Amino acid sequence: MELSYFAIIIGAIFVNNVVLAQFLGICPFLGVSSKVETSMGMGAAVTFVMALAAVVAWSIQTFILVPLHIEYMQTIVFILVIAALVQMVEIVLKKVSPSLYQALGIFLPLITTNCAVLGVAILMIQKEFNLLQSFTYSVSTALGFALALVIFAGIRERLELDGVPAALKGNPIALITAAILAMAFMGFSGLV
């Protein structure tokens, strides 16, 4: 049975959210989510990298790895593709928006090792998506990542203004909030 594009989009954003349901990409999720503006920038960068990585990874898998029967090289090749794309994003962001580049700091090059990006590249191959489905899946997954990041950042900004007990300030309340947010997203699991 072939999934409709609507099912792919809703499933990737809400039902199987890469951060809140599959628990991939937790490092940037916790590290960059202290401000909404920074989270939106990271979400945009991850979306761009995931979209390009999907097209390039699908093309390499279909036209190089499978015909040469070297599918076992998939993970290494995908990591190299993602690393090159992240370097490109880093160079462009440094020129276009130096303030966002500074705000993202170390987390921008860490997109290379963000297991969510690699996971999406591998999952789209495992699900045997065609090119358009792969692109749709990767962009939707990245938008789900960005949505979770921005919602979490908004909640964290609000928590900074509220009276949180001293024992829970910082990471403890962030982890509790992330858990509650993950449980809230589990409510979407009946949709697809």
Image (tube, rainbow, N blue to C red):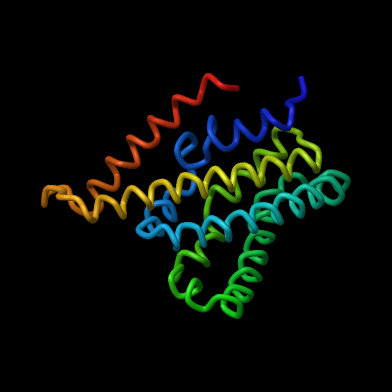
State the residue in front, 165 or 60. 165
Q: Which residue appears at 65% of the width and 58% of the height? A: 48
Q: Quadrant of the N terminus?
A: top right
- Left or right: residue 4 versus residue 18 is right
Q: Position of residue 149 (x, y in %)?
A: 45, 50
Q: Which residue appears at 76% of the width and 33% of the height? A: 128
Q: Position of residue 105 (x, y in %)?
A: 44, 71
Tag count in the figure? 0
- Left or right: residue 59 versus residue 90 is right
Q: Quadrant of the C terminus?
A: top right
Q: Which residue appears at 74% of the width and 27% of the height? A: 4
Task: Check the image and report above or below for 83 versus 50.
Answer: below
Tell me where residue 177 sits by quadrant. top left
Tell me where residue 66 sits by quadrant. top right
Q: Which residue appears at 53% of the width and 33% of the height? A: 14
Q: Position of residue 58 (x, y in %)?
A: 77, 47
State the residue in front, 27 or 104. 104
Q: Residue furthest left?
A: 166
